[in-house]
Amino acid sequence: MTDLETPVAPPRAEPAWRRAAPALLGYAAVRALGLVTLAVWSAARDKSPHQLLSARWDSLWYTRVAELGYGYEVRLPNGDVHSNLAFFPLLPWLERAFAAVTPLSYADAGLLVSALASLAAAWGIFAVADHVYGRRAGVCAVLLWAVLPVGIVQSMAYSESLFTALAAWSLYAVLTGRWLTAGLLASLAGLTRPVGAAVVAAVWVAAIASFVRERSVPAPTGARRWQRALAMLLAPLGAAGYVLWVGRHTGKGPLGYLDVQAGWRNGFDGGYAFARFVADKFTSFPSALAGLALIIGVGLLVWLYVICVRQRQPLPLLVYAGVVTVLALCASSYFGSKPRLLLPAFPLLLPPALALARLRTSRSAWVLGGVAVASAVYGAFWLNGSGPP
């Protein structure tokens, strides 16, 4: 699985959309179940599911950027400054574009972008998993992504679905040797979330590995070389461009974006703050159970990644999943957001997807159906409670 430019299976005459149709239909059904459950639960609590999905937490910040541009900030009593410069621009740009050509509000435009992006993400995840392990594994990977406990975020006016779509298709482009497409999509991913660095790293490592491999195996054409080199140049432009613009806008130079994130108490500390948070849970018995659950969760992530390595996933998938996981776990941000930050790490789902694909269809359907119901109930409970930060 290390040859990035040779598909696992021979080319098929079946149209790509038809091949992906079972995965996309299954994904849409899971998301519909989640939304219906949210609507029923919210009605029982006299809350608006529309507001929960489009007008709370980060979604408000994105719509403010779309409507008013950058420059809005909130000063908290403790001196912290929450600036909308912390939010990357691609999602609000798309919200503004859809609102300009449709009767939709900025908030509703955000929901539409999220809905379309989540389908694109599901298709991209299927394309990657199908390329590596085959169609059944691809369908299972998409459904596993849909039934994650915080999968309801995929239907919110957040940037996770948009980012995952760009990342998945960029990785697929790398795996199939479409270097210019990979570089362009990586650049757009870098305009969506800070974790776009993971996509850039995957493109760079894959390209460098190809160059090294050519020292022993001559390249088919010289054109492929310059395409890879151009992809490496394109990939970081989105993130670098926005970070440099923020530095100029704030007058604090290239590190200005770090100051913006510091105002939100976000940063990278190697996991020290998260470790302290987990350790503090063991100061009393009820919270100790939560601490134990967090340790088990982190252990599960590490275990899944080890399996990915043992199954010899393609190098760009390993790099991407590793960087996403490290950035999520080692950030000093609000700890309740970590499951949401891990949503884009879909390559970690490939080992259980492969295991499900090996089961009889009826058995895997029962497993996924049961988890889908549990995920829908949890998502409705979560958004009607503390919800995502």
Image: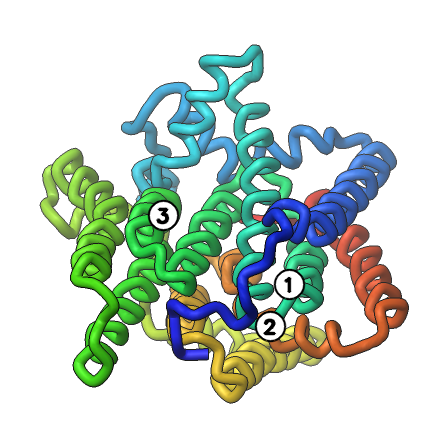
Drawn side of residue 122 relative to residue 385, left or right: left
What mark, if any, has residue 235 been given in the picture? none
Q: Furthest residue to the bottom? A: 310
Q: Say what secondary structure mark 3 lies in.
A: helix
- What residue is pinned by disc 1? 138
Q: Position of 176 compared to 380: left or right?
A: left
| Residue at the image point whose x is 57% and y is 61% from the top | 339
Q: Label 2 near label 3: C-beta < 8 Å?
A: no
> Badge 1: how crowded within 10 Å, few (<14), some, or many (20+)?
many
Query: Mark 3 — residue?
Result: 185
Q: Dot 2, how many residues are within 10 Å of its Cα: few (below 14), some (14-19), or many (20+)? A: some
Residue 133's tag is 2
Q: Residue at x 65, y 55 (%)?
A: 150
The x, y position of residue 74, in whole percent, is: 37, 34
Residue 303 horizontal/vertical position (percent): 56, 84
Give whichever of discs 1 and 2 has the lower sequence position. 2
Mark 3 surroundings: few (<14), some (14-19) or many (≥20) residues within 10 A: many
Residue at 59% x, 49% y is 16
Tag nearer the camera, 3 or 2: 2
